[in-house]
Structures are given as C-alpha cells and as structure tokens.
C-alpha cells in the first residue's frame, strides 16, 4: 500500500512540470523535442539508481560524481583504444566499490567520510588518465545513445528500461528484498542467517555497476570526457532519490521514483531556462522546487496518519 | 541564394567600401535570433564579457541587425549543465548559438545536435572541438611563451621563476602552461622552482603563493595566467620578500598596483590577456555566418597587451574591479575573417 502511494507524488510533480514546460515551449512537445529535453537525464537517472543502492543500506555516497567522471574518462580513452583493458578497469572499479562496502561495514566506518575521501581518489585518477579534456566515445556507444527507436525517443525508452530493470532487481527479486531489509533492520537480517557484510558489498557493487553505466551513457551523449564532467551528479543523485520518494533511513526507496526524480530535476533546470530566469536565481529556484515537493510529501503523510 | 552569396563575398573583399555592403548584409539577418551560452560569470573577466555582449547585442537589435541577442549563463560551471542549456536553445528556436564552453570536448554531443538542427554554433575563448562549429581561439600557448620571452629581455642573467597556474583540468590552463614551459626550455637561464594553482582569482593566488613561499629560494620572476598577479604581489609583500618581476593579466587591480609601484620605485613589467570583448567579435562572426558569408571554421584573435607606455591610458579606461577591454565591431570581424581566408 505505502509503496504504491510513495510513487504517486513523483509522477504528479513530473506531470505538472512537463505540462508547464509544454505550455512555455510547445516545440518541446515532439519526438525530437522530448529527446532534447531528456537525453541528458539518462546518465543522471543511472547515477540516481546508483545512489539509491547506497541510500537503501542507510549510507550515503559523496563520491558518486567523481566516480562517474572517472568512468567517463576511462570510457573515452581506454575503452575506446583498448576495449579489453578498458573493460577490465571498469570491472575493477565495480569490485573496488564492493570492497569499499564490505570495509565500511566490517570496520563500522561512517560511509559519508569514506566516500568523501574516495571522491578525491577518483578525482585524482580521472585527472591522471585525462589531464586535459578529450578522448573519444567508442562508436558503438555513440550509436547506442543516439539511436532513434520507433514511437518514443531514446531518452524515454531508456528511462523506462532503467526503471523497470531496477524495479525488478530491488523490489521484485528475493535478494532485493533482503537488501532493503539491511537498510530496515540489519540486525534481524543477520539473525535470519544472512551475511550482512556480503549484502553491503553487493549493494555497493550494484552502485558501482550503475555508476559505471552512468559514466558510459554520459560519454555516449557528450562524445568525449573531461575529469570534471559529472561532479554535479553527487548532489543531483541524492536529490533525485529523495524527490522520487526515497528516505535516508529504513531501506525505504523506490527505483521507479528515483528515475522519475532524475527526470524531474533535469526538466526543472530546462523549465527555469525557458522562463529566462537569471542564473543567480536558478539554483535557488531549483532548491525551491525540491522543497515544495518534499513539503507536499510531508503534508500527504500527515494526512495519511490521521486517516 | 547562390547569387547573393557571391555578392556578399565580393562585398567583403572590398573592405574599403565597408558600410554600404554591411547594410546590405544586415538586412539579411534582421529576423535571426542569436543566443549566448556562457558557463561561468563569477569573475571580472566574465562580467566584462557579458557586458560587452549586452552592449553590442542591444545595439544590434536596435539597429535591426538581428531580432534577438539573448545571454544565458548556467547556474553552475558544469559541462553537463551547459549541454542541457544548448539543447534548450535548440528547442527555443535560435538561429545561432555563440558559445563560451565549459569543456572543449564534453559539449560536442550537444553542439552536434544543434548543427544537425540547422543552428549555427560559434565558440570563442572556451572553444569546442566538434568540426561543425566555428572556433574563435586565442593562441594561449603563444601568450605563455611571450611572458618568458619578455622576462628574458628584462632579466638577461636569468634566475628562478614561480609559475601561477589556472584551474586544474581546464584547457586554457594547460595551453598557457605549455607555452611557459616552452619558453623556459628556450631560455635556459630560467628555472621554474615552484608552481601553484591560483584559479585565476587574486584571493586563491595569494593564499597558495603564501603557502609555497617559505619553501622557495630567491625568485626573480613570476609567470601568471591573469587574475592572479595582484594576489601574488600581496603574498610576497606579506612574507617580507622583495617583489619579483610579476607578469600581469590586464585586471584593473593589477594595473593599479603596477602604476603605484611604477610611481614609487620605477617598477616595469608587461600585462597581457584576451579582451573579454571577444564575445562581441563572436557575435559578429555568427551574424556573418547567418548572412551567408563564407567564414573559415578556425579564426584567431590577438591578445590585448598593456605595456609601460600604454598603462596610464588603459588603466583610465578600465572600471574598478574590471579588466582591460576592447569591443569589436562588424568591420573588425570582417577583417579577422578576411585574414583567415
């Protein structure tokens, strides 16, 4: 019940914003327009799912933006020039993420500190691999990200696929249920015979996987990379998870909501642009939209409790 | 269409007859809309750039050269934000996008989308590598090398240099630094003994120079990237060390400090940077492309140099907190285009 209503508010927020954008800029109401509006939301949606995996186990990842940037740098260099080596590096990154999860749990370290530290490691590695902007997207990746499917544009199709895959993985599957349990009550999961350290490693590993996908998608769209390309994703992904109905504690998350949250944040920025709002106000306005949605959620919940 | 192109080419070749033909070209673009996509507005150079755009843009709209010249700045200096901004401009139906890019490569996808939608893209200062866009570039490496060449004329005996760099990972920083190191390789009497990032901001430069100074031997010269010279001078003063020869970057506070030092003890140096008015040059180049002029994809603008002789004049013309500037006209743009052909 609760999970069904959890998804309602993100959908309504997106619909309202989309309606306003179409009213402001009727040109956006087309196959071409929708793709332009939303294609850059695809890597953000993937990064948001990655962040959601971490938030699901009651942690937070402050290194995600730097991590996605590093992946982008590897994708635009090694994955293009020496695909096997590049693939190996990306797999190594995912494994590192899983190990980080295990270490954070085993030593009871605060994830916020560990990931903040790792953000400098990722950033340094990215600058090391790509000291000045450049690199080239592998051709297959570029054609994948610019594909023109029938009926709906790539951005919409990709969002639906990402949301469906994450939903099946986290909400429907057996292991997903246990993973959410770790966020809800790690001790009882442990008592039930599960190894929490392995589950945490799995959650972090999944975050690494989606982070890698985000970096690759970004390079496919941008055609090349630089070491600072995705730094914004850290905060956007957290905002996306929360906007999509997730909560910081208790394993309460919604994969479909997270994807919608990412789309909403992307659209909010475009909407403010169409409004010709001065850039000095735009960040504030984006924050206001976020607070409005969260306030609406609180009001709904209060009412829910009273009923 | 073809005939008008031929006519326009002929017109621009006869530069002396500028005004008459210019009017002919202007009428062609009176219905066109040009947008400025800017990634950052947080320093004096960018503020002056936006002001140049505003001046030239509103004048051009008033004269009927174009129907709109709107400036947009992203709220955060990030390539992903600017890519979204460019895609929004395509949706808004602009005919040309003038672009100061957050990254030379990370916007290529969005720029390609714009070209495919029939939008003219002209990049300047922070240029993009996508082949379908025009580039108005400054030879930053030559600028770095010129700094060392100047030091070699003033300090023939050589000595230790301190290098102030810009923002790490940005193309301009790499290029200027490359030029400086080329210059040092050529003039072997110089040696770079330290290097700090000043991020093109006086406060950052001052803090970081103050941090590295205690570990440095005597420094005779400082090579900078602009916006960091005054902070460097303050750091040397605070450490009680003699002021070395600091190459400046045309900022008003730097030039004011220079004039003050010159009056006090005959301090001599050189100041060089790109004029933020290059935005107005990019505007006219975009207008020329829209008018059907054949414009080479790669154009170069000279940098603006302030010497001991022109210091007083330039300082007087530069508002407090700003940077030395020139505004380019349609004729300047036509001359730059003719040079590149």
Image (tube, rainbow, N blue to C red):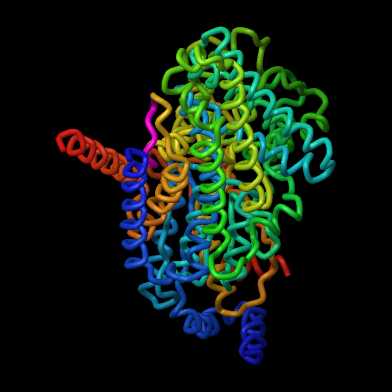
Q: Examine the image and state in which quarter residue B211 appears.
A: top right
Query: Residue A281: in sight, yes or no?
Result: no
Q: Is residue B117 above or below residue A222?
A: below
User: Where is B109 relative to A121, above or below?
Assistant: below
Residue occupying image coordinates x 52% and y 22%: B233
* Residue A269 position within the rendered picture, expressed as x and y whole percent measured from the top left: 40, 51
- The spot of residue B340 in percent (x, y) is 71, 66
Residue B126 position within the rendered picture, expressed as x and y whole percent measured from the top left: 59, 49
Q: Is residue B177 visible?
A: yes
Please state which of residues A137 and B42 is positioned toward the viewer in this rendering.
A137
Which residues are drawn in magenta?
A243-249
Q: Is residue A268 magenta?
A: no
Give residue B54's quadrant in the image: bottom left
Quadrant where the C terminus of chain B sits is bottom right
Magenta-drawn stretch contains A244? yes
Name the residue at 40% across, 70% down: B68
- Left or right of residue A139: residue B257: left
The N terminus of chain B sits in image quarter: bottom right
Residue lying at the far left of the rendered structure? A306
Answer above or below: position of B230 versus B239.
below
Furthest toward the bottom, the residue is: B3
Q: Residue at x 37, y 56 (%)?
A: A271
Q: Main secondary structure of the magenta part?
A: loop
As rendered, which of A100 and B322 lies closer to the eye?
A100
């Amino acid at each position: 019940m609760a999970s069904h209503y959890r998804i309602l508010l993100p959908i309504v927020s997106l619909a309202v914003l989309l309606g306003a954008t179409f009213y402001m800029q009727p040109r956006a109401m087309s196959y071409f327009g929708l793709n332009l509006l939303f294609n850059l939301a695809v890597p953000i949606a993937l990064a948001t799912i990655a962040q959601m995996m971490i938030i699901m186990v009651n942690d937070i990842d402050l290194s995600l933006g730097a991590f996605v940037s590093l992946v982008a740098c590897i994708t635009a260099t090694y994955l293009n020039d020496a695909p096997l080596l590049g693939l190996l590096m990306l797999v190594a990154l995912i494994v590192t993420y899983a190990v980080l999860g295990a270490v954070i749990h085993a030593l009871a370290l605060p994830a916020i500190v560990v990931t903040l530290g790792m953000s400098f490691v990722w950033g340094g590695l990215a600058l090391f691999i790509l000291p000045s902007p450049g690199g080239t997207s592998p051709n297959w990746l570029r054609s994948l990200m610019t594909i023109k499917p029938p009926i709906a544009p790539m951005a919409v199709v990709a969002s639906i696929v990402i949301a469906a895959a994450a939903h099946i993985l986290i909400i429907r599957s057996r292991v997903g249920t246990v993973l959410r349990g770790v966020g809800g009550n790690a001790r009882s999961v442990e008592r039930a015979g599960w190894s929490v350290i392995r589950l945490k490693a799995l959650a972090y590993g999944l975050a690494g996987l989606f982070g890698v996908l985000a970096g690759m998608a970004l390079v496919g769209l941008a055609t090349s990379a630089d070491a600072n390309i995705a730094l914004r994703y850290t905060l956007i992904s957290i905002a996306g998870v929360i906007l999509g109905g997730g909560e910081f504690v208790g394993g309460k998350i919604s994969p479909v909501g997270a994807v919608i949250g990412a789309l909403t944040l992307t659209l909010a920025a475009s909407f403010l642009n169409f409004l010709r709002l001065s850039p000095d106000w735009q960040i504030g306005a984006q924050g206001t939209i976020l607070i409005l949605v969260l306030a609406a959620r609180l009001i709904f919940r209060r009412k829910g409790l009273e009923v | 269409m073809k005939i008008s192109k031929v006519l326009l080419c002929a017109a621009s070749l006869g530069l002396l007859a500028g005004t008459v033909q210019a009017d002919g070209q202007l009428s062609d673009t009176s219905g066109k809309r040009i947008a400025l996509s800017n990634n950052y507005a947080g320093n004096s150079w960018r503020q002056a750039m936006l002001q140049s755009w505003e001046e030239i843009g509103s004048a051009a709209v008033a004269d009927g050269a174009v129907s709109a010249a709107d400036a947009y700045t992203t709220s955060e200096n990030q390539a992903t934000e600017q890519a979204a901004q460019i895609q929004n401009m395509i949706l808004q139906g602009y005919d040309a996008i003038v672009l100061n890019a957050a990254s030379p490569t990370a916007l290529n996808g969005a720029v390609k989308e714009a070209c495919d939608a029939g939008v003219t893209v002209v990049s300047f200062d922070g240029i993009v590598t996508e082949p379908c866009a025009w580039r108005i570039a400054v030879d930053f490496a030559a600028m770095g090398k010129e700094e060392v060449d100047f030091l070699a004329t003033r300090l023939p005996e050589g000595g230790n240099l301190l290098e102030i760099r810009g923002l790490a990972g940005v193309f301009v920083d790499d290029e200027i630094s490359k030029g400086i190191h080329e210059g040092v390789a050529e003039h072997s009497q110089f040696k770079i003994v330290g290097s700090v990032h000043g991020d093109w901001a006086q406060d950052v430069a001052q803090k970081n120079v103050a941090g590295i100074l205690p570990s440095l031997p005597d420094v005779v010269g400082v090579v900078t990237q602009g916006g960091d010279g005054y902070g460097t001078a303050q750091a040397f003063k605070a450490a009680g060390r003699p002021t070395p020869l600091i190459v400046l970057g045309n900022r008003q506070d730097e030039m004011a400090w220079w004039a003050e030092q010159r009056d006090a003890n005959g301090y001599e140096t050189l100041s060089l940077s790109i004029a933020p008015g290059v935005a107005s040059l990019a505007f006219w180049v975009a207008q020329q492309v829209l008018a059907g002029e054949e414009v080479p994809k790669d154009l170069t603008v000279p940098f603006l140099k302030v010497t001991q002789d022109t210091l007083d004049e330039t300082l007087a013309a530069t508002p407090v907190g700003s940077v030395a500037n020139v505004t380019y006209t349609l004729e300047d743009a036509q001359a730059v285009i003719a040079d590149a052909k």
